[in-house]
Each structure stands twice: as C-alpha cells, then as structure tokens.
Image: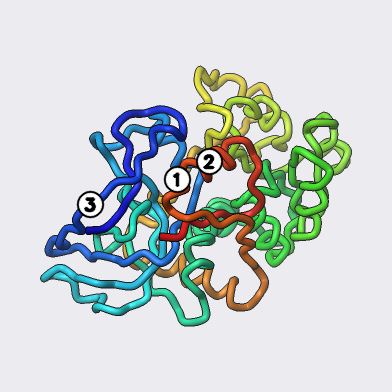
C-alpha cells in the first residue's frame, strides 16, 4: 500500500484527503515514478477549488515532481528502472508517494540537479523558459514588467531576465518582497500596496511603457497591465491568482495602442517530448551554471498538503515550496 492526497469534492484546503492506495501498474506507454519531492504550485489550488475541472472525482492533485523510475510499460524505450526523472505537466496525481504518467511527459534529470531542486523548479522554470525565451523575442536591453516578482515564478524570472540582459520591473506587495526581487536581479520594483503601478511604469520608462508585460494575477491587474503595455506591445496573461479575466472588450486593445494579448500555458509549448526535454535541458543548464538559483522557502510533508495550500493562498510563502513524501 502507498499514500496519496486526493479530492472527492471541490473547495478549500479542507477537501484534501490523505488516503491509502495501491500503486497501479503502468500501461504500455507509461512509467511509474517513486516520488522523492513534489512541487507546490498555484495551479493546484485551481484544480482543488474547481476553477479548473479534474477529469473526474475523486481525483489526485499536483502536476510536478521528481524521483526514480520504479516500473515501465511494455512499449517504453526511453527510460529504465532506476533512472532519475522529473515532470511538470501532469496528468494530475503528483501528490503521492508514486505517480503513473505517460513516458513522454518525463525528462531525464542530470546528476547536478537534486530531486528537491527539480521539484521546486520544473513547472516554474519551464514557465519562465517559454515566457522569456519563446514568447518574448528579446535582443537584450528591453524593459519589461513582471507581476508578483518575489513569488515562485517571479523569483526565477528576475534571475533569468538579468542573465538575458533585460531590465525587469517587478511588482511586489511589501518592502521586504521588493528587496528580495532586487536582490534576485530585478532592475526596479513597484510596491502595489503603496504605489500606482501604471504611473510608476511611465516614470521608470520615461513615458515609453513596456514592450512586454507578464501578468499571472489575472482579474485584479488586467486593466493596470494594459495601461503598462507600449503601443503594439504584448500582454502575456498566464495566471489567475486573483480570478480569471472575463468579459474582455477587444476594442480596448485598439484604444490603448493596437496591443497584442496572449493566454499561454506550458502544454502549448512543451507539446512534444523533444521540445519538453530541450526546454528542461536549458533550465537545468541555467541552474547548474548558477545564473538561476531556485530557493526553497518552505518544505512540508505530503500529509500536510492542506497547510501548504493555506500558506500559499495567504501569500505567506517565499520562493518555491516542496512537499516531501
């Protein structure tokens, strides 16, 4: 027998159940991974609350983890028992002592990267990779705006942007988080609890605004983000921390300077095993070189997943959080 977290209904952290289960045998194209560390991400709360619907209930939770291959399907040729692997793009069920998933969702984990690093960095790091390296076509020297710059994704984005020669303006919610973002590589910070974000962007850019704005907050920052995008610039809306953006009037994009908007997700960029591995290899190289460091601010036992969700929702976490089976 093994243990996992599951949900039988949607709701707050209290719906997370710590249950016994029997690890299934992998299908022909699947691999069973013995998890050594599991990543906690805001998207997990969307599946828990019902904002994103799991395929069926009861359901496992979690998309990201790292561990060792302990069983492979009959048609799997890329992996063997004992291989060190990591994953970040589901299917749901990472919150467990094991996880069975398609082999094409796994990447090889180099010896230089430990399991906790991988679980803390995979989803956030691959997100930053596609945001900065695939969506943003930068020459270096551009000034960009990145919301929640002291959070899990933002912490990595500050460092990666600095490595690319970008001037990242990060929004934060306190002086302490502003100091953290600057220490990680943000060129400037804006404390949205005290400052007008759009006005400060104008001041910091000498009225030019930003060619690209990255917004993981959603509903509460949508209008502000549009006001920070330069004419013919791009707003990248990649999260819903404050709720989903709805009722968008496309005419506003014309009024504010013929703007572009995209709503990407990792699955749209890591859509083949080859692209996924290439993205992960770039992430691992950045980690191994020290240009990007992942800070694990919190560790919880997997059985304490509800407490971890409470900390995440109340913005008490700093950097990345891992769950340990």
From the image, tell me which residue sits under label 1: 265
- Callout in the foreground (1, 3): 3
Label 1 to label 2: alpha-carbon separation: 7 Å
**Point 58% across, 26% down: residue:** 219
Label 2 to label 3: alpha-carbon separation: 34 Å
Q: Is residue 198 above or below residue 129?
A: above
Disc sitting over residue 238 in the figure: 2
Label 1 to label 3: alpha-carbon separation: 31 Å
Q: Secondary structure at mark 1?
A: loop
- Point out the tag, 1 or 2, that comes first from the N-terminus: 2
Mark 2 surroundings within 10 Å by alpha-carbon count, few (fewer than 14), some (14 through 19), many (20 or more)? some
**Point 58% across, 19% down: residue:** 251
From the image, tell me which residue sits under label 3: 21
Q: Position of residue 73 (x, y in %)?
A: 15, 68
In this rendering, position of residue 276 left or right of residue 186: left
Q: Position of residue 54 (x, y in %)?
A: 30, 36
Q: Secondary structure at mark 2?
A: loop
**Point 49% across, 38% down: residue:** 263
**Point 42% across, 30% down: residue:** 49
Labels 2 & 3 near each other (Cβ < 8 A): no
Disc sitting over residue 292 in the figure: none
- Point out the tag, 1 or 3, that comes first from the N-terminus: 3
- Point out the tag, 2 or 3, that comes first from the N-terminus: 3
């Amino acid at each position: 027998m093994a243990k996992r977290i599951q949900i039988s209904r949607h709701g707050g952290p209290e719906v997370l159940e710590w249950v016994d289960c029997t690890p299934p045998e992998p299908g022909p194209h699947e691999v069973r991974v013995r998890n050594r560390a599991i990543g906690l991400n805001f998207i997990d709360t969307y599946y828990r609350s019902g904002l994103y619907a799991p395929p069926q209930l009861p359901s496992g939770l979690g998309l990201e983890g790292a561990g060792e291959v302990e069983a492979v399907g009959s048609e799997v040729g890329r992996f063997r028992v004992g291989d060190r692997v990591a994953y970040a793009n589901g299917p749901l069920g990472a919150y467990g002592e094991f996880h069975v998933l398609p082999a094409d969702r796994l990447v090889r984990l180099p010896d230089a990267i430990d399991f906790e690093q991988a679980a803390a960095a995979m989803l956030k790091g691959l997100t930053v990779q596609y945001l900065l390296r695939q969506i943003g076509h930068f020459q270096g020297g551009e000034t960009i705006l990145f919301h929640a710059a002291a959070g899990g994704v933002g912490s990595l984005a500050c460092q990666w942007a600095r490595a690319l020669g970008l001037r990242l303006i990060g929004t934060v919610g306190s002086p302490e988080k502003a100091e953290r973002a600057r220490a990680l590589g943000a060129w400037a910070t804006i404390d949205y609890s005290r400052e007008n974000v759009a006005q400060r962007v104008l001041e910091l850019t000498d009225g030019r605004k930003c060619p690209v704005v990255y917004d993981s907050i959603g509903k509460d920052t949508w209008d502000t983000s549009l006001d920070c995008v330069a004419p013919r610039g791009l707003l990248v809306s990649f999260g819903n921390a404050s709720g989903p953006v709805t009722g968008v009037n496309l005419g506003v994009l014309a009024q504010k300077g013929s703007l572009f908007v995209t709503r990407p997700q990792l699955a749209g960029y890591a859509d083949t095993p080859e692209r996924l591995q290439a993205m992960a290899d770039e992430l691992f190289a950045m980690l191994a070189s020290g240009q990007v460091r992942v800070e694990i601010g919190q560790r919880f036992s997997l059985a304490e997943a509800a407490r971890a969700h409470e900390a995440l929702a109340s913005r008490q976490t700093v950097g990345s959080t891992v769950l340990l089976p």
